[in-house]
Every structure is written in structure tokens, then in C-alpha cells.
Amino acid sequence: MFSVKKIEMVNKTFRLPLDLVERLGVVAQDKGVSMNNLVTQCCEYALDQLDSSSLSKDEKQSNK
């Protein structure tokens, strides 16, 4: 059965290099997604690929 899920979002401000923002903008436009959506997906992918041996005990706990 279909159920609508509300994802809690928060606003944060990050400083990113201009060239990175421009590259993200090109990819977002090319793929037809918002830059916010693209950045979210990039961050999730990077965190999923992060070598767990480099995480502290607290970071490993918060990823569960």
C-alpha cells in the first residue's frame, strides 16, 4: 500500500568552492534535478562509501 512519508529537513549554510558549485549546477541541470537534491545524493553516497575503519566509535554508532 502507498504511504506518504514526510522527511524532516533542516536548513544549513555551507561554504563551497565556486568551481564545485558550478559543476554541481551543470550536473543538476543536465539530470533534471534540483541542486539541493543532487547535493543530498552526493553526501549520502559519500557517507555510504566511507571506510568504516576510519570512523570513531561514536560515528559508527550514529550511522546505525
Image: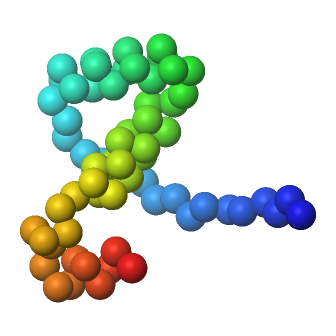
The colour scheme used to paint the residues is rainbow
Can residue 13 be seen in this snapshot? yes
Residue 14 % position (x, y): 25, 45
Residue shown at 34% from the left, 74% from the top: 63
Quarter of the view holding residue 26:
top left
Quarter of the view holding residue 32:
top right
Residue 59 % position (x, y): 22, 77
In this rendering, the count of numbered labels is: 0
Of 46 and 22, the residue lying toward us: 46
Left or right: 4, with 54 as reference point: right
Residue 62, compared with residue 16, is above or below; it is below
Residue 23 % position (x, y): 28, 19
Left or right: 39, with 20 as reference point: right
Residue shown at 46% from the left, 59% from the top: 10
**In the image as oriented, which residue stretches furthest toward the right?**
1
Residue 64, compared with residue 15, is above or below; it is below
Can residue 36 be seen in this snapshot? no
Q: Quadrant of the C terminus?
A: bottom left
Left or right: 53, with 4 as reference point: left
Residue shown at 42% from the left, 46% from the top: 40
Q: Quadrant of the N terminus?
A: bottom right
Of 5 and 11, the residue lying toward us: 5
Residue 14, compared with residue 53, is above or below; it is above
Residue shown at 33% from the left, 25% from the top: 24
